[in-house]
Every structure is written in C-alpha cells, then in structure tokens.
Image (cartoon, grey):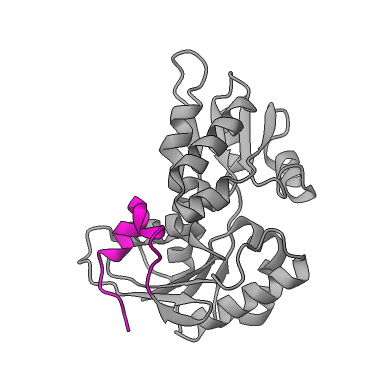
C-alpha cells in the first residue's frame, strides 16, 4: 500500500505522521513545492497549476490515494486535481475541522491565514456547520511562514499576536491551516480557555488520514511492522526532508523509516 501527500511545504507533515501512526507498514510519498512556495499569495489559476504539477509528480509513483495536505490548495485546486486524477487515483482534500468544534458548543475561534480568514469559503463552512454557535475568525499573519522555517522567535510572536485577538472565553480553537498543527502545544499554552475548562484544539490530520485509508480500502493497523518506506519529492525531484521539517516530532517520525531512492 502506498499513500501520497502534497502541499507547497511542510504543512503535509501532520497528515503524513497520522497515516504513519495508523499504518506503519504503508509506503509514503510526500510531494512539496519549494521552488514555488508559498502558494497563498498566488492567483487561484497559478496555484492550481503548481498544485497539479506537484500532484502529478506524486501520481507518477503510483500511490493508492493522494491527500491534499493544504487548506489553500483544497479550496482552489481540489476540483482540478480530481478532474485530472480521479477515478484512477482518489484525491482527499483538507477541510478545517469547524463541524466537530461547533458540535461541542461555543465559543469557538478559527485560526487561519489572513487570506482564508473572512473568505467566502470559510464563511460558508461556518454557516453550514456552526450555525448558532459563537465563532470568532482569527487571522494569523506570518504564522505559517514561521512554522515552515522553524523560526522559534517568529512562531512565538505570531502565536502571541493571534492569542491576543482570541476572545478569552473560547472553549475550542480550529487550526485552519495544516502548518499550525505542528505547533499545536504552543498554541494551547498561549490560549488557555476559560477558568478550569480545558481548551480543545481541532486539527484535520487524523480525520484526513482515516479517510485516506477508507478510500484506499484498507483498515487501520497501528501495530503493524514499521516497514513503510518514504519518498520525498521537492518540486518533482527526489530529495530528503528539510532541516526545518526534522525539528518537528512529525518530521522525526517520518525520518525514522528508510528513505526510498
């Protein structure tokens, strides 16, 4: 079994690590675009073209399913990716976990990139899944870039600034960018929640990984032998996980397996 993941950068790591935990025997192909990142400032047409190239590089390795480990790419490029690759290769998009966060009641904060915050896409998700729940959209300028570079000072500054924009009574925070899951505990420490009520963070990685296994037609088997190989594609070229990727627990987990050459 082989599962591919794509993103502009290391935002795919949380979902890749979630797949690794569910199926340690699965081969993984992680395809990113260091030559073209970041994707956020690009036009939808340009972003879609970059995403298609990254996806096709992964598809050449004949995976059983492809995860789009990026909220921005899922918003703008998912229809084109599915039109190009399905039904031969199932494509799984990433959607902010607004529905499970709202199920627990409010108040809820959604941390997202400035481009996503207030967007019609995010507002539609709020109307569909959080109607009647108090929701605050919190822009997080610079946080994804800081996480991508593993810049601890910039991460702390961006997290602290977003925490100041977050109402003090929130019970749940939706991590609306896959990069943010890499610093989830730093976010939890900055936003403590009201009183003694523990703050709940809602990411997408676990749900996306489980959906990928379902689409691949295989069950979770977390106690399987850790025999899965890792192939790293950098704008289509085979390479290795970046230095910043290896500073995170998710990157270290992936690096613990043999790298396919």
Measuring from the top left, give residue 52's x and y in whole percent. Answer: 64, 77
Q: Is residue 247 magenta?
A: yes
Q: Residue at x 45, y 84 (%)?
A: 61
Q: Residue at x 47, y 64 (%)?
A: 212
* Residue 117 position by quadrant: top right
Q: Which residues are magenta?
A: 240-261
Spot the residue most to the right: 120
Measuring from the top left, give residue 127's x and y in whole percent. Answer: 75, 40
Spot the residue most to the top: 195
Q: Nearer the viewer, residue 227 or 179?
A: 179
Measuring from the top left, give residue 44's x and y in whole percent. Answer: 76, 66
Can I make out residue 204 in this image?
no
Q: Nearer the viewer, residue 115 or 97?
A: 115
Q: Residue at x 65, y 47 (%)?
A: 113
Task: Using the image, determine if residue 241 lies above or below residue 222.
Answer: below
Residue 180 vs residue 20: left or right?
Answer: right
Residue 92 vs residue 152: left or right?
Answer: right
């Amino acid at each position: 079994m082989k599962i591919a993941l794509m993103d502009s950068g290391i935002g795919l790591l949380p979902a890749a690590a979630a797949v690794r935990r569910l199926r340690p025997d699965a081969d993984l192909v992680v395809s990113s675009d260091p030559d073209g990142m970041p994707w956020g400032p690009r036009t939808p047409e340009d972003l879609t073209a970059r995403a298609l190239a990254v996806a096709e590089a992964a598809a050449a390795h004949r995976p059983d399913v492809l995860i789009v480990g990026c909220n921005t790419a899922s918003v703008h490029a998912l229809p084109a990716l599915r039109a190009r690759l399905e039904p031969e290769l199932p494509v799984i998009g990433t959607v902010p976990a607004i529905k499970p966060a709202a199920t627990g009641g409010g108040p809820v904060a959604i941390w997202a990139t400035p481009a996503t915050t207030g967007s019609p896409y995010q507002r539609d998700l709020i109307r569909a899944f959080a109607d009647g729940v108090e929701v605050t959209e919190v822009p997080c300028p610079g946080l994804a870039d800081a996480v991508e570079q593993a810049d601890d000072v910039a991460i702390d500054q961006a997290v602290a600034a977003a925490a100041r924009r977050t109402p003090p009574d929130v019970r749940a925070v939706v991590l609306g960018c896959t990069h943010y899951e890499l610093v989830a505990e730093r976010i939890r420490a900055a936003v403590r929640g009201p009183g003694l009520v523990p703050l709940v963070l809602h990411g997408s990685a676990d749900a996306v990984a489980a959906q990928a296994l379902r689409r691949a037609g295989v069950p979770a088997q977390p106690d399987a032998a850790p025999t899965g190989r890792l192939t790293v594609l950098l704008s289509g070229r085979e390479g290795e996980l970046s230095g910043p990727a290896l500073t995170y627990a998710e990157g270290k987990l992936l690096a613990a397996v043999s790298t396919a050459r």
